[in-house]
Amino acid sequence: MRIREITEADWPQVWAIIQDVIRERETFPYDPEMTEEQTRLMWIESPPGRTVVAVDGERVLGTAKMGTNRPGPGSHISTASFMVAADARGRGVGTALCRDAVEWARQAGYAGMQFNAVVESNRSAVELYQRQGFQVLGTVPEAFEHPKLGRVGLHLMYQAF
């Protein structure tokens, strides 16, 4: 597996991954009815941000987007989002994407990385981020409507560099 910048040819596979993840309604607070165009505008970052794919040959296993969390006085903090194809989960793809994003942010001179809305019931993601040095700073109770668990919290997670 290698991680590289997204290309136009990758988009159909990335779109399929994003569609699957957001339509599950279990791990991402994105509108499951977003169109392909809306999704592309949201997912493909403009510089200084970056969008990448994790690939095995020509197959896209996962994708990440990263950039400045907020403009202006908050622009010294980065953020990132990650999605992995269902049949590639548990194989280290998310870990590799997270490490890549953190390294990118460090090299770009950010002071830290903030995840704004990690679904608390998404234990694999929470534990992955904690293994990579992130901590839960707080949780907004019942902020995410999970299709099976009802309302669950959204974590704010952070790592200082």
Image: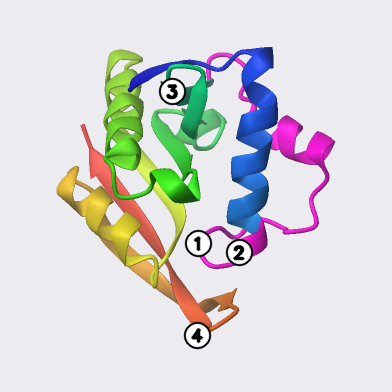
Q: Which residue is mark 3?
A: 55
| Residue 24: assigned label | 2
Q: Main structural element of the magenta stretch: helix, strand or loop?
A: loop
Q: Secondary structure at mark 1?
A: loop
C-beta proximity under 8 Å, tags 1 and 4: no
Decide which of tag 1 and tag 4 comes sooner along the chain.
1
* Closer to viewer: mark 4 or mark 3: 3
* Relative vertical location of residue 148 with respect to residue 140 in this rendering, above or below: below
Query: Residue 5, position in %: x, y?
Result: 50, 14
Three-letter code, disc 2:
Glu
Q: Residues within 10 Å of mark 4 (few under 14, many from 20)?
A: few
Q: Mark 3 and mark 2: span between their CA atoms?
A: 23 Å
Q: Is residue 103 magenta?
A: no
CA distance separating discs 1 and 2: 8 Å
Q: What amino acid type is highlighted by mark number 3?
A: Val
| Residue lying furthest bottom | 150
Q: What residue does disc 4 label?
A: 149
